[in-house]
Image (cartoon, rainbow, N blue to C red):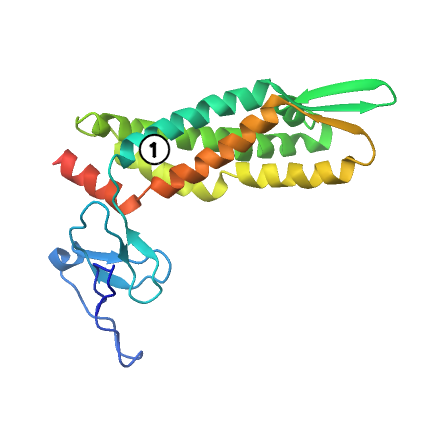
Amino acid sequence: MSLADVVASELPPQINPALPPPAFTAEQAEHLIACPLCDTLHEERDIAVGETARCTRCHEILEAPRSMAMTRIIMLALSALVLMVAAMFFPFLELSVAGRVQRSSLLDTILAFSSGMTAPLTIAMASLIVILPSIRFLSLVYVLAPMAFGHRPARHAEFFFRLADHLRPWAMAEVFIVGVAVALVKVAGLAHLSIGPAFWAFVALVIVTVLKDTFMCRVTVWKTLETRRS
């Protein structure tokens, strides 16, 4: 009951929704995997490197192990941290109006709302754009680096990987760069704008983040953690 590139099989669906769901023993439950999109249960199987396991109902990717994936994720996460530092302190934009030139960095933009009623906005911007993405990158390096070198997982690696996974929807660097692009279009007619190196560093940061998420396979990482821990 699987497609050509599917190596996970769907459990028989319930014919009558009024019937209670089937009961599984603890041993059986350990060999089941749920689709992250539609929650369909599948039998867990060993997936070879380069193969892709998809949900038989919605075709969402369940597992897709790739060669040297951990090393690539580590390098991309470290690159993202370097780009984050560059985006924070280098000039982001230069605005010229009536002979007056104003340069601002990402840090200046965040601190611009640090007084008065807009102070909570500073905390929100700093958290969603800088702090949470940085914590996520550092957590992935902490989890994957020891295993990439053939060692046992680091202490509390499972906690930090779960933290990195939970922070993914809240790391909104790509949302910020889209907002900046929209603002540039609106302000371009009112003043002369020059894009600084921090802007391009932030664009590169978004691209690196997307590539990192492409190489990331949560199920494979969890399996590796369990195997190396035992």
One can see residue 175 in this view: yes
Lateral position of residue 33 relative to residue 61, left or right:
left
Residue 216 image-quadrant placement: top left
Horizontal and vertical percent position of residue 48: 18, 48
One can see residue 138 in this view: no
Horizontal and vertical percent position of residue 16: 28, 81
Residue 25 image-quadrant placement: bottom left
The residue that appears at 81% across and 36% down in the rendered structure is 189
Q: Nearer the viewer, residue 180 or 41?
A: 180
Residue 29 image-quadrant placement: bottom left
- Asked if 77 appears above or below 185 in the picture, the reply is above
The residue that appears at 23% across and 61% down in the rendered structure is 42
The residue that appears at 70% across and 32% down in the rendered structure is 118
Residue lying farthest to the right in this orientation: 98
Residue highlighted by disc 1:
73
Callout 1: SS: helix
- For badge 1, the amino acid type reads Ile
Q: What is the quadrant of the C terminus in the image? A: top left
The residue that appears at 49% across and 41% down in the rendered structure is 170
Lateral position of residue 52 relative to residue 80, left or right:
left
Lateral position of residue 82 relative to residue 120, left or right:
left
Horizontal and vertical percent position of residue 67: 24, 38
Q: Nearer the viewer, residue 198 or 16?
A: 198
